[in-house]
Each structure stands twice: as C-alpha cells, then as structure tokens.
Image (cartoon, coloured by chain):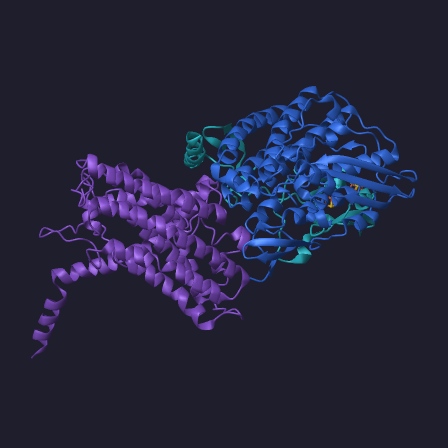
Chain colours: A blue, B cyan, C purple
C-alpha cells in the first residue's frame, strides 16, 4: 500500500492547537512533521513594549498551566539586572508557589497522558484534586490560574491567616490520595500494557536532542535546575530528584508522579521553615535597570525555562528571549514517532507533556 | 505472577465502584456558589473619596484597561472589563488604597459598551449572590467519603 | 353480510388471546419497545454511572429529579433527525446512505430471536420471544456476525482517511473476535446438547453455567465486549487517534442509526450473556421476567464499567489477546468439558451425547 498523508490536527480530539503531518503506511507512522504556530502571540515582542512590572502577566501567558514557575525565571532575571537581593521570606513564599504550581501542572499533564490512551477517569480524578491547590492559590494570590504573584523585588502578598493549617490539611489528604492513584492507574494492567515500551528515549538520544525536565529524568539523567543551580530557597530544602531508567511513556508518567510526592514534601518543609521578615524590597513602579543583560533559568513542570533579558537603560526591556521547555522537548517528538503504530502517537505526544502555547509563545 | 496480573486488572474495577459513592468537588454552580477568598481578584471597585487622581493605576495596568477621565475637573480612573486580565496590579499599587479588588466575578454583559465602567459605575460594589444561590465552601476532606461542601 | 357480522369477525380476528400475546411480544417485550427504552435508559445510565466514577455529577436537567438527563437522548435524536445529511465529496453515495440505515435493522432482527422469559399464562408454557426457532442461538450469532461487513462497507464508503483506518481496524478486531465468541458459545451448546436458548436456560436449573464453565464465561464476556467495541476495546472508534473511526463522517439521521445500532447490540449481547451463563429468567420468588431484567441490568453495568476503569488497548495487543489468550482458553474449556463428560458425567446437566 502506498503511503498516506494524514493531517492530525488542529481540529482533532487530542491534537491541541497545532497539527502533525503523519505519513502513514497502513497503521504504522513512518514519518511525522509538527506544524506549529497556531498559537503564536508574539509574547517576546509584546514584552519589549511594556515596562518590567507590566510584563509579568504577559510572560505568564507563555504557559498558563504552570503560571507560577514561568514567571519565576522572568522576575529573577529582572532582579539580576537591577542587582537586588530579595528577602528570605519572599524566597520561601516563591518556593511554595512554585511547587504548588508544579503539582497543578503535573496533575494536568498526567491527566492528559491518560486521555491519550483513552482513560478519562484518571483525568477527572486529577482535575478533581487539582481543585485543592487552586483553592489554596486563591487564598494566597487571589487568582486560581494566572497568579501574577511574583514581581521584581519579591511577592505581592504575605501568607494569609490560616494558610498553614489549610495547606497542611489539604496536603495530608492529597498525599493519601496519591496512593490511590498509584493503585488505580500506575498498577492498572491495561495502562501498563499501553504505555510500557512506547516512545523509548534512550539516555544518549535524550541528551543529544536536548530534552529537558521530567522527560530527561525519565531517561536516567539526573538533571534538575533546582539541584544543579539552586535558586530561591531550594538550597535549604531537602528533596530528591526522581529518575527512571526506561525512558518510555510509563517512565515519564512515573517521574511526574514521584515529583508530585517530592513537591508535597517540599511545600511541607518550606511552610515549617519559613522565616519572618519582609516579603518585598522597595522597587519603583516603573523600574529602570541599568544597561546590561541577564540570564536566568528555573525548573518548570515541563523542564528548564531560560530567560535572556537585555536592558538598554530605559524602563522597557530591549529584548526578552524565552527558551521554553516544550519547544526543546518538541525535538524528541518526530524522532520518537518513526515506525510506531498510529495508536502510539497521542501517547508519545502527551507523555512528553508538550503544550502548543509554550512552543509558539 | 498470574495472581498479580489478576489483581492489577480487578483492583481498579473495585476502586471505581467504591468511588461511585463518594462526594465530589463539583458545585452545582448556578444554584450553589463557591465562597471566594478575601483576596479574590474580581472587578476593581473605586472609592471616590480616597482617590487623588494620581494615575498610577493607569500607568501600571498592563492591558491599558484603565484610562483617566475627567469628572467635574477631577481625574478619575475609568475601567474596561473587556481588556482587564485581573492581575490586580492597579489595586496593589494604588497609593491611597482607593482602588480595591472585589470578589464579584459575574461580569458578562449583553452589550459591549456596558463593559466600560466610568468612575460613577466603578464605585458600585457588585451585588452579593441572590438569595436563591447558596454560598458554600469546602468543609470536610476525607479519604473514605470524599469532599463535602457546606 | 351486514356491518355487525363484519365487526364481529374483526373482533374475533383481533381480540383474541394469541393475537394480543403476539402484539405484546412484537411491540412491547422483548420486541420493539424493550430495545428502544433500553437505548434511552442505557445512554442516560452510562453518562450518569461514568460521571459518578469520574467524580463528576453528570446530567442534571431534562428529566425529573435524580433522573435528570433521561430525556436528553430523545431531544438529541429529534434534533439530529432535523439536521441536513452531509454526504462527503469522496463518498460512495448509495452505500453511504444505505448501510447506516441497515445497521439498526439487523440489530433489531437479532433481538427478535431472543427468548426472555416464559409468558405469564395459565395454559401450556409459552415464551416471550418474537420468533421462535430451535436454533435461535445460531441465528443470533449469525446476525451479529453481519456487523463487521457493514462497518467495513461504511468506513470505505465514507471516503475519508480516518474512516478508512477505522474500518480496517474494525475488520481486524471484529473478525478476530468472532472465533472466541463462537467457541465459548459452543461450550455451552456442547454441555446442553441443544441450540435452543430456552433449553439452555432450563438446563441451568441446578447450576448456572458461570459456575460450571467459568472460563467460557470469561472468554465470552471479553470477546463480546470487543465485538461491541466498548472501552478497553473501542479501537475502531478510538477518538484520540482517528477522530471517531469509521463513523467520523456521519451526521444527522445516519449518526442516530449508527449509535442506535451500537446500543441495541449492547442489549443483544447482554441478553446473550444472561441467557447463556447466568441462568436467564430462573430464580426464586420474583416473576421470571423480573429475574431476567435484574441479571440483564447487572451485565449491562459491567459492560459499561469498562469505560471508566481501563484505557484502550492497541490493535496489536488486542489481536494478541484474542488469538493467543482467548482462543486457547476456550479450547481448554472444551477439553475440560470432554474430560468431565468422560470421568464425571453427573456434573453435567444432560447426558453427554458422545460420553
Ligand atoms: S485609584 Fe488609586 S492609583 Fe488610581 S488614580 Fe485613584 S488614587 Fe491614583
Ligand atoms: S486588574 Fe490588571 S489588567 Fe485589570 S485594570 Fe487592574 S491592572 Fe489593569
């Protein structure tokens, strides 16, 4: 049979806001080309026309699933430009927000992986328990999804009254719920059959393709910016980086799952250890950093995000370059989807946790 | 080996049946309303007596949702809900706390021009949910029965 | 001949017991009304059950109180029937229009051969079955086996890439799973020594076949699930991969027919499982029809639950499961029956012919 070219997306149940060109031979995909750009919003260009603080909500839109960690890198870069050191307490609050954001994002990502194999229950349970953390976010920042909580110089608000108790209550519940998840989903024979050995990314290939984040760690590379180059309060907190050796879709899901457990423990420690003090240093409403450039990287839920900001001494950045994690992970997608059954395409795509928003910016 | 296979197939079935009887997070929205937190960022509300017309809110707004307009030879902010991203910066940076974020989030209108809130309209606090809507909040979290709202 | 004699003869023709019994059988139970009501109820029940498993609430409106959503299917069907029929540019016009309409007819035809309970009467025992033949299990399975060809035809006639792929997948899956269905049904037929569903049920008076032939039950249930294309096995639809498989292009009345046929098939399969393995209408105290409906309901719940508990398999894994696990299991069951017939014939309900 000759090779058939199928357009997989953007109007397709799971393709998201982009398309893949699939060359299909029967049920086997022989070649795949991503067709990106459907959600290009020109965030980098928009950022050049706003002041440093106004940029926070803009940059956040790079990937709203993980709004906490995405801004993290931006504000750090701006602080580096301005040469300011933020108070200890602000660092802890940032750590807490970052980890909660990671949990929220991983729950969503794992749910999508489940959807790829046709397992709606998993998505629904995860979305249900995501609510626990969205409520906490609402308490702390006032918003459920787009927090705009970090600004250059610190954070907007202090922890509210009763936050500690409420957070501990929810974390306890969530931690016990995680055991349910492991039994229901990761020990489910059908789920194992469907994801084990699918989209195997070997260690060398992962490094060569420049894959980042949980996908890299699932291939056995212990790389995490939180450990390698600790920022915020991560150097004072005790946690491990979960890794897996197999590098298949199940391992990628497993790494995310274990990161959930680690995040819970990080939030607990940070809440216990948090020092008193100020939460913000005074920064003018329109900060004007001196001429110069800064680079900052943080570990988001999907991997390392890098911000490169050039200042020309005015109150707007001269250039903001975002190197987004999904864009780096995207390179693995055509590599992995060669000579695989059509049915594995969604599994590979969503086990890499690719988000079109993040790729296009 | 065979035993673990059978367990891994049957256990999820049992767990799914158990979950049928659990309470859930869903709140039947039009009839029940989830209580918003104190910091909830809905529509900003202006206090005319406090506002000094400095224009900081208009300067900081990332989306130019706030413009300064003249009302009887004083300058007050005018708010466009269609442009707002509810970042809360205007309220945060307002020097006199004249502008405050309010919990009201039911802002949809049939007419686009109604989305623009001139100062006189921005002063009004969004009405609380009507009587027929019950305001609930998450009360109990338990592994055996699930989540209870009350 | 005056008017009165005409009326009298008409009354004699229509108001008599056999005619009314026939009407009840054909129109109400198990005839037309039963599958229709079943479809309405099953769709609602599936939505509600899955919502509960998913920790959602499920449909609330269009229906009274806790039955919220039960009339939604009727509203949907009415809406869909009004819709324009869109025939794709590449489609084979005639087949595209005819085959989906044929699907529910064939499913309903299978329903006509299934006896569901003895008729509650004083005279000689009569059965609630539209059309009785002593070979009804063969007829039902044969009508069931027509479906794959309709599916393949429909997928090809739609002339779209996704429908073609869905049809090819359906061809693999449905044809592969015919074999275990037949083999496991053959176990029951061997033990009973009859192709008659009524005899099969009555021979279960002492012990249900689910206890006597557990492996055959397992094989039959799983492969029926695959035949129906319910989740773990809904590969021909697989909306994450090929949109909606062979039914992607259907709109309006075609879509209604296809969905209706799927749920009537579910009804037929649940009836078969109940009759072959769960003792049909046998049971104490309650009337036989009630027993049948209870068992039938439980089987339906298990058919529907698959969607909430398991992800979908891949086509190669599915075929492996069919050829490498289910068929050998069915053969093992046949072997066990033969051994039993040789060494412990008192276990089997009827004297084994070859024993
Ligand atoms: S609302 Fe606040 S920031 Fe805005 S003009 Fe009035 S005083 Fe200034
Ligand atoms: S909330 Fe943000 S976007 Fe909305 S008016 Fe205030 S500053 Fe502007």
Q: Quadrant of the C terminus of chain C?
A: top left
Q: Would residue A149 be seen by someone viewing this image from the given angle? A: no
Q: Would residue C297 be seen by someone viewing this image from the given angle? A: yes
Asked whether C95 or C60 is in front, the reply is C95
Q: Quadrant of the N terminus of chain C?
A: bottom left
Asked whether A315 or A115 is in front, the reply is A115
Is C186 on the left-hand or right-hand side of A251?
Answer: left
Is A121 on the left-hand or right-hand side of A278?
Answer: left
Ligand 1 quadrant?
top right
Work out whether A63 lies above or below A219.
below
Is B74 on the left-hand or right-hand side of A60?
Answer: right
State the image quarter where residue B86 is shown.
Answer: top right
Q: Position of residue A122 (x, y in %)?
A: 52, 39
State the image quarter where residue A170 is shown.
Answer: top right
Q: In the image, what residue occupies the spot 23% across and 37% down?
A: C340
Is A45 on the left-hand or right-hand side of A67?
Answer: right
Q: Position of residue A184 (x, y in %)?
A: 49, 34
Asked whether C42 or B148 is in front, the reply is C42
Q: Position of residue A174 (x, y in %)?
A: 56, 29
Q: Position of residue A259 (x, y in %)?
A: 63, 31
Asked whether B9 or C239 is in front, the reply is B9
């Amino acid at each position: 049979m000759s090779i058939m070219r199928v357009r997989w997306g953007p109007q397709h149940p799971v393709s998201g806001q982009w398309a893949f060109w699939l060359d299909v031979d029967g049920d086997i995909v022989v070649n795949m080309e991503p067709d990106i750009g459907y959600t290009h919003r020109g965030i980098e260009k928009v950022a050049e026309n706003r002041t440093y603080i106004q940029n926070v909500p803009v940059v956040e839109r790079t990937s709203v699933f993980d709004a906490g960690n995405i801004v993290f890198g931006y504000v750090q870069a701006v602080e580096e430009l301005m040469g300011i050191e933020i108070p200890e307490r602000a660092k802890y609050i940032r750590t807490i927000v970052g980890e909660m954001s990671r949990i929220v994002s991983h729950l969503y990502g794992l749910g999508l992986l489940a959807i790829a194999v046709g397992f709606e229950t998993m998505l629904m349970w995860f979305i249900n328990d995501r609510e626990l953390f969205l409520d906490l976010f609402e308490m702390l920042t006032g918003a459920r999804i787009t927090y705009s909580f970090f600004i250059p110089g610190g954070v907007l608000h202090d922890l509210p009254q009763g936050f500690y108790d409420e957070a501990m209550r929810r974390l306890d519940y969530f931690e016990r719920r995680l055991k349910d998840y492991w039994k229901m989903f990761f020990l489910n024979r059908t789920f194992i059959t469907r994801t084990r050995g699918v989209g195997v990314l070997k260690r060398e290939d992962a490094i060569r393709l420049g894959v980042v984040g949980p996908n890299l760690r699932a291939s056995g590379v212990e790389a995490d910016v939180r450990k390698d180059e600790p920022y915020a309060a991560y150097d004072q907190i005790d946690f491990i980086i979960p890794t897996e050796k197999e590098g298949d879709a199940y391992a990628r899901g497993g790494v995310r799952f274990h990161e959930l457990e680690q995040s819970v423990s990080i939030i607990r420690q940070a809440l216990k250890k948090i020092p008193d003090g100020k939460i913000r240093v005074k920064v003018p409403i329109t900060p004007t950093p001196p001429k110069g450039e800064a680079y900052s990287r943080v570990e988001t839920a999907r991997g390392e995000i890098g911000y490169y900001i050039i200042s020309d001494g005015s109150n707007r950045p001269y250039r903001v370059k975002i190197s987004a994690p999904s864009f780096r992970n995207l390179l693995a997608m055509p590599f992995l989807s060669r000579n695989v059954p059509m049915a594995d395409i969604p599994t590979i795509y969503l086990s890499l946790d690719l988000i079109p928003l993040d790729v296009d910016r | 080996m065979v035993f673990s296979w059978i367990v891994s197939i049957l256990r999820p079935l049992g767990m799914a049946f158990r979950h049928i009887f659990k309470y859930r997070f869903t709140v039947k929205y039009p009839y029940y309303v989830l209580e918003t937190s104190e910091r909830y960022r809905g529509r900003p509300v202006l206090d005319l007596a406090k506002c000094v017309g400095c224009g900081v809110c208009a300067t900081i707004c990332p989306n130019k949702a706030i413009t300064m307009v003249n009302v009887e030879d004083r300058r007050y902010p005018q708010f466009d809900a269609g442009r707002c991203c509810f970042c809360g910066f205007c309220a945060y940076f307002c020097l006199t706390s004249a502008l405050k974020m309010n919990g009201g989030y039911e802002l949809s209108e049939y007419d686009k021009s109604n989305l623009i809130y001139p100062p006189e309209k921005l002063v009004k606090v969004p009405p609380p949910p009507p009587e027929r809507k019950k305001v609930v909040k998450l009360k109990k979290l338990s592994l055996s029965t699930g989540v209870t709202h009350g | 001949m005056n008017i009165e004699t005409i009326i009298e003869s008409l009354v004699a023709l229509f108001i008599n017991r056999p005619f009314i019994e026939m009407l009840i059988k054909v129109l109400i139970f198990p005839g037309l009304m039963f599958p229709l009501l079943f479809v309405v109820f099953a769709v609602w029940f599936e939505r509600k059950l899955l919502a509960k498993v998913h920790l959602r609430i499920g449909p609330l409106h269009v229906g009274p109180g806790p039955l919220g959503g039960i009339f939604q299917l009727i509203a949907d069907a009415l809406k869909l029937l009004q819709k324009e029929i869109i025939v794709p540019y590449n489609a084979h016009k005639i087949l595209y229009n005819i085959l989906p309409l044929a699907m529910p007819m064939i499913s309903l035809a299978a329903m006509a051969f299934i006896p569901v309970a003895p008729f509650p009467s004083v005279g000689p025992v009569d059965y609630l079955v539209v059309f009785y033949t002593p070979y009804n299990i063969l007829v039902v399975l044969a009508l069931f086996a027509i479906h794959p060809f309709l599916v393949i035809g429909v997928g090809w006639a739609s002339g779209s890439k996704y429908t073609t792929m869905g049809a090819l997948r359906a061809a693999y899956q449905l044809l592969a799973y015919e074999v275990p269905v037949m083999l496991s049904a053959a176990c029951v037929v061997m033990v009973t020594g009859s192709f008659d569903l009524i005899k099969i049920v009555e021979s279960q008076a002492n012990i249900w076949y689910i206890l006597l032939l557990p492996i055959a039950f397992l094989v039959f249930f799983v492969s029926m699930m695959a035949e129906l294309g319910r989740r773990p096995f809904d590969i021909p639809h697989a909306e994450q991969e090929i949109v909606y498989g062979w039914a992607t292009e259907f709109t309006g009345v075609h879509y209604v027919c296809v969905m209706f046929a799927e749920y009537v098939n579910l009804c037929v399969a649940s009836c078969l499982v109940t009759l072959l393995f769960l003792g049909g209408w046998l049971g104490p105290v309650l009337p036989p029809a009630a027993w049948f409906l209870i068992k039938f309901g439980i089987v339906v719940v298990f058919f529907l639950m698959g969607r909430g508990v398991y992800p979908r398999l891949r086509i190669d894994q599915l075929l492996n499961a069919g050829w490498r696990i289910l068929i050998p299991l069915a053969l093992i069951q046949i072997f066990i029956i033969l051994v039993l017939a040789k060494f412990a014939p008192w276990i089997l309900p009827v004297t084994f012919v070859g024993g």
